[in-house]
Amino acid sequence: MERPNIDWSNLSFGYMPTDVNVRCTYKDGAWGELRLTTDANISLHMAATCLHYGQEAFEGLKAFMGQDGKIRLFRLDENAKRLQSSSRGIMMAEFPEDKFREACLLAVKENLRFVPPFESGASLYLRPLIIGTSPQVGVKPAAEYEFILFVTPVGPYFKGGFKTTPFVLMREYDRAAPFGTGVYKVGGNYAASLRAGERAHELGYSNIFYLDAKEKKYIDECGAANFFGIKGNTYITPKSTSILPSITNKSLMELAADMGMTVERRPIAVEELAELDEAGACGTAAVISPIERIDDYDEKKSYVFSKDGKPGPISEKLYNRLRAIQYGLEEDKFGWITIVE
Ligand SMILES: *Cc1c(COP(=O)(O)O)cnc(C)c1O
């Protein structure tokens, strides 16, 4: 196998062309066979529903090369189920779970030379998506859909080591509404978050912190990541009808419980931030992005979680355990791993 000439350790979270991608078409009420293509472009009708009415949902998961030379996919069944839930949420055809699994394995196997080596700390990112493709001018769901899965190598999130960054809480932006599409992984939510994200970056923060859109009292999400806090021996994460159910957060909750911690999933009032010992954002990209402080932009006050840039001990422990399972350094006692054979 001839490896491409890539500086694996210095890869960003960007797009790099790989050998092939996987496609599947839904037509006449059924999904067809998986196809492989070298074409990175798609030919689309100009009246396709994804272009006008936002019929698009996606997923994100990673494949890791272990020290033992085995390639591991993390919790892909959860991604398959969530893509189905997102599809139901915006009335698209649901992609079957077994086909999803098959597509992930095929995409990794056909792009093996792009799986970063263990030592680099990098991984292969899988991006499955579904779009409504048939023409429609009246507002209603498409009759035809396309599933696409491409892969691209991505660098280690923390290049200078696992460290904290500042977040900003602003009440003038919402990502999603209660009972809206926040619980679905759809492109429209990301479009709705771009202005807030840019504003936070301009102000020197790594990300934006959202409160619930209705009452502006409770913590919702941070950027496109779930929030969690550590208070003594308790792992706390918000519960709301506009949060995307993160698979990383779900895994961290299971690990925290396994480590003897109490796990609470409940509404968290913004003032409770003052009582937390540690705070972090979590998602596939970084696993945990520990929070240095949250500046409340409107109330002109700060909640500080780290004074020296170092993450708290429990965040660090959770991060190390999850990474160890992903790279096969710790036994997979939860059954989270699929080995690419
Ligand atoms: C994808 C996503 C997350 C993180 O989910 P993971 O399954 O952990 O990657 C969190 N919030 C939003 C809004 C997302 O889109």
Image (cartoon, rainbow, N blue to C red):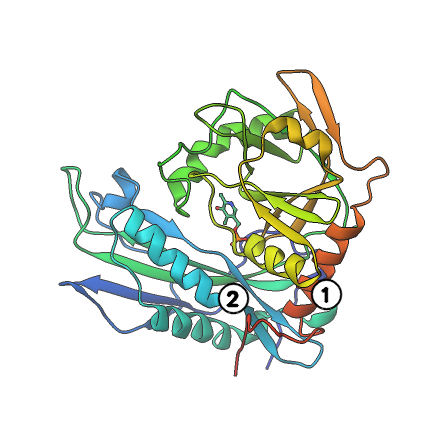
Q: Is residue 278 visible?
A: yes
The location of residue 2, given as percent across then percent down, is 61, 78
User: SS of the residue at dot 2?
Assistant: loop
- Figure quadrant of the N terminus: bottom right
Q: Is residue 287 visible?
A: no
Quadrant housing residue 248: bottom right
Residue drawn at point x = 39 percent, y = 33 percent: 178
How crowded is the residue under tag 1: few (<14 C-alpha within 10 Å), some, or many (20+)? some
User: Is 42 placed above or below 105 here?
Assistant: above
User: SS of the residue at dot 1?
Assistant: helix
Q: Is mark 2 within 8 Å of ligand 1?
A: no
Q: Which mark is residue 230?
A: none
Residue type (three-letter) at the residue carrying disc 1: Ser
Q: Nearer the viewer, mark 2 or mark 1?
A: 2
The answer to whether 243 appears left or right of 310 in the picture is: left
Residue type (three-letter) at the residue carrying disc 2: Arg
User: Is 142 placed above or below 107 here?
Assistant: above
The answer to whether 283 appears left or right of 31 in the picture is: right
Q: In this figure, which residue is indicated by the disc labeled 2?
A: 75
The location of residue 272, given as percent across then percent down, is 66, 31
- Residue closer to the observer: 164 or 227: 227
Q: In this figure, which residue is indicated by the disc labeled 1?
A: 120
The location of residue 31, given as percent across then percent down, is 23, 67
Report the number of discs: 2
